[in-house]
Image (spheres, rainbow, N blue to C red):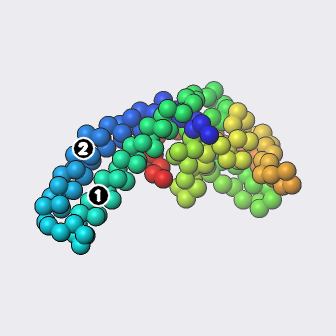
Amino acid sequence: MKDRLTKSDVEKIQAEIEHRKLVVRKEAIEAVKEARAHGDLSENFEYHAAKKDKNQNESRIRYLERMLKNAVIVEDRSREDEIGINNTVEVYMEEEDETEVYRLVTSIRGSSLQGRISIESPLGKALLGHKVGDRVHVKVNDAYGYDVVVRRIENTQDEEEDQIRSY
């Protein structure tokens, strides 16, 4: 599956890759060398921990590089009156008689605990492009869906301090 990323996401990923290659990789190699110098490797916990950290860093670098290679760049700007990526949206859930607030983000920055939903999620897909006052049907699967009403759209384009989610 191709990840849909904004230019900002790509820049953050590239910065993380660079940091991991230039800083973390050197620290990890040094930690392995230092632990190796402590003697018998078969019972050297520090050595095994340092190797594990080094390998995890290399895996993360490969993962991020693969993500960039397969990424589809999406525009994070939308019309002022329309729901788009990085907009905060207040929706009224008719079934529960509740109002919820979400921020639409790309899949790598989604975090339901922080109120950020992916544009790939059923709710995110349904909301994209709608306006205040629209009743939107969210199709969860072939057998179930629900309606929400868009109450407010807030442009939150400049709040780009979210971290890229680690897997």
Res 23 label: 2
According to the image, label 1 marks what residue?
51
Question: Which residue appears at 71% of the width and 47% of the height?
Answer: 123
**Placement of 116 over or under 50, stated as above or below:** above
- Is residue 154 among the parts visible in the rendering? no
Residue nearest the observer in this picture, 131 or 167 = 167
Tag 1 or tag 2, which sits nearer the N-term? 2
User: Helix, strand, or loop for circle 1?
Assistant: helix
What amino acid is found at the position of numbered circle 2 in the picture? Val
The CA span between labels 2 and 1 is: 16 Å
Q: Secondary structure at mark 2?
A: helix
What amino acid is labelled 1 in the image?
Lys
Task: Identify which residue is drawn at 48% across, 38% down.
Answer: 66
Q: How many marks?
A: 2
Answer above or below: position of 85 versus 146. above
Q: Say left or right for 144 vs 48.
A: right
Q: Which residue occupies the foreground of this view, 101 or 123?
A: 123
Is 29 left, or right, of 120 in this rendering? left
Q: Give the percent coordinates (x, y) of residue 67.
A: 50, 38
Q: Residue at x 74, y 42 (%)?
A: 126
Q: Quadrant of residue 64?
A: top left
Q: Position of residue 42 (x, y in %)?
A: 25, 69
Q: Can I make out residue 108 in this image?
A: yes
